[in-house]
C-alpha cells in the first residue's frame, strides 16, 4: 500500500508538470497568434501538438483519477470500523500521567520545564531521557525530582523518544505525554489533552493558530507550509469512500498525549526500525501518528501555545537547509509507510 501511494503521489507530480507545461504553451500561442490558435492547428506541428494533448494527456489525466478512485476503495476496506470515529466517550478513570522529556544539553530550560509539568494535575512522574548531555542538565533534573534515564552514548532524538515510550509503558500511568525540554510548549495545555483523550486514543498539538504562537518562535513560513502540506498528504493517504480520515494541519508538533492501551498496540512496530538512520532519528514521532491512524485508532489534533525556545536547537531546525532535509525525510516516511 505504501509503494502504491508513493507511485500515486509521484504520478500526480509528473501529470501536474505536464499539464502546467501545456497550459503555459497555450498561453504563449494565445499571446502570439490569437485565441483561435488554441483550437485550430495551422501546421503539421500544431496538429501533432493538439493530437498529443487530446489523445494522450487527457487520457493520462483520466487514468490517474481512476487510480485515485481505486486507491480510495482499497482504503475503505483497510479501515475496520468507521463508527469508531464518531463522537463517543471513553472516560479515563483516575488519570495518571507520565511526562516523557528527551534532553541533550538543556540546562538553560530544564528546571522550569520540569517544575511546570510537575505542578500540573494528574502528573504521576516526569521522566527524563538524557542523550548523554555534557552540561548540567542531569544534575538539575535530579534536583527537581525527575526520574532520570541516562544513556551511555548519544543515540539520537528518535532513540530517546522510543526509549521514553517504552519506559512509560512500564509505569502505572495510563497516559503518556511527550513534550520538549526547551520551554516551547505550555504545560497548562496538558489539561486539554486529558479532556480530549476521553474521545480519542492520541491527542496531538497543532501550532497552526497564530494567536497562540509567541512572536519570534522557531517556526518560519517554510516550517508552517511544509508541515501543512505533509499533514494534508497524510490525510490523502488515509482517505477512503466511507471515512474522510483524520484532520491534520501540523506533523512537526512535539507535544502529544497517548493512552497507554493505544501505545501498547503500536510499540512493537516502532521498535522494528533502526533509530540510528536519519529518517527514524527525526521521524519517530511522526511514525507514531501514522501507526495510530493505520491501526484505526482515534486521533485528535488541538491548538497549543508555541513559544520561543530556550537555548540552541540540537537538530539545527532553525537552519533552512536542515529544515528542507528534515521535510524530505518526513515526505519519504509518509510515502513509504
Image (cartoon, grey):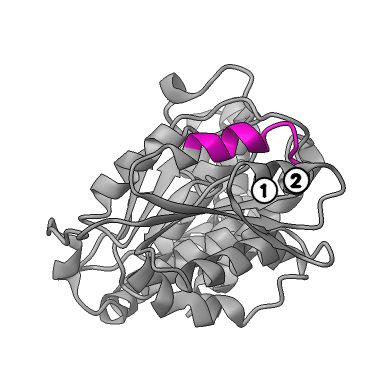
Q: Residue at x 87, y 48 (%)?
A: 134
Give the labeled residue for mark 1: 142
Q: Residue at x 45, y 33 (%)?
A: 208
Question: Residue 308 got which mark?
Answer: none
Circle 1 packing at 10 Å, graded few (<14), some (14-19), many (20+), is: few
Q: Residue at x 13, y 68 (%)?
A: 83
Give the labeled residue for mark 2: 139
As drawn, 23 above or below 97? above
What's the magenta region?
A: 106-116
Looking at this rendering, what residue extends furthest in the top direction?
215
Cα distance in 3D space between marks 1 and 2:
5 Å
- Residue 96 at x, y = what percent? 34, 57
122 horizontally vs 138: left or right = left
Q: Quadrant of the C terminus?
A: bottom right
105 horizontally vs 208: left or right = right
Q: Which quarter of the picture shows residue 272?
A: bottom right
From where the camera sits, is residue 29 visible? no
The answer to whether the residue labelled 1 contacts the one labelled 2, judged by CB atoms less than 8 Å apart, is: yes
In magenta segment, residue 168: no
285 horizontally vs 199: left or right = right
Of helix, strand and loop, which one carries label 1? helix
Amino acid at each position: 500500500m505504501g509503494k502504491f501511494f508513493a507511485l500515486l503521489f509521484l504520478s500526480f507530480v509528473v501529470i501536474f508538470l505536464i499539464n502546467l507545461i501545456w497550459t503555459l504553451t497555450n498561453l504563449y500561442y494565445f499571446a502570439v497568434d490569437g485565441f483561435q490558435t488554441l483550437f485550430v492547428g495551422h501546421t503539421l506541428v500544431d496538429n501533432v501538438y493538439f493530437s498529443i494533448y487530446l489523445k494522450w494527456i487527457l487520457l493520462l489525466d483520466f487514468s490517474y483519477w481512476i487510480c485515485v478512485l481505486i486507491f480510495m476503495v482499497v482504503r475503505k476496506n483497510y479501515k475496520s470500523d468507521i463508527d469508531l470515529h464518531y463522537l463517543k466517550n471513553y472516560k479515563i478513570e483516575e488519570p495518571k500521567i507520565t511526562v516523557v522529556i528527551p534532553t541533550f544539553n538543556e540546562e538553560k530550560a530544564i528546571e522550569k520545564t520540569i517544575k511546570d509539568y510537575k505542578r500540573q494535575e494528574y502528573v504521576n512522574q516526569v521522566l527524563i531521557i538524557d542523550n548523554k548531555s555534557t552540561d548540567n542538565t542531569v544534575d538539575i533534573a535530579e534536583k527537581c525530582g525527575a526520574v532520570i534515564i541516562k544513556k551511555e552514548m548519544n543515540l539520537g532524538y528518535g532513540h530517546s523518544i522510543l526509549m521514553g515510550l517504552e519506559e512509560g509503558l512500564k509505569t502505572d500511568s495510563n497516559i503518556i505525554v511527550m513534550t520538549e525540554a526547551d520551554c516551547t510548549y505550555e504545560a497548562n495545555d496538558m489539561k486539554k489533552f486529558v479532556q480530549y483523550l476521553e474521545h480519542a486514543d492520541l491527542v496531538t498539538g497543532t501550532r497552526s493558530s497564530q494567536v497562540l504562537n509567541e512572536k519570534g518562535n522557531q517556526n518560519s513560513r517554510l516550517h508552517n507550509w511544509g508541515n501543512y502540506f505533509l499533514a494534508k498528504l497524510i490525510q490523502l493517504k488515509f482517505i477512503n469512500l466511507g471515512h474522510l480520515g483524520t484532520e491534520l494541519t501540523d506533523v512537526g508538533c512535539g507535544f502529544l498525549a497517548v493512552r497507554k492501551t493505544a501505545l501498547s498496540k503500536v510499540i512493537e512496530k516502532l521498535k522494528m526500525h533502526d533509530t540510528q538512520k536519519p529518517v527514524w532519528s527525526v521521524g519517530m514521532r511522526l511514525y507514531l501518528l501514522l501507526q495510530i491512524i493505520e491501526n484505526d485508532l482515534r486521533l485528535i489534533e488541538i491548538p497549543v501555545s508555541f513559544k520561543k525556545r530556550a537555548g540552541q536547537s540540537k537538530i539545527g531546525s532553525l537552519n533552512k537547509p536542515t529544515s528542507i532535509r528534515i521535510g524530505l525525510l518526513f515526505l519519504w516516511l509518509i510515502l513509504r509507510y
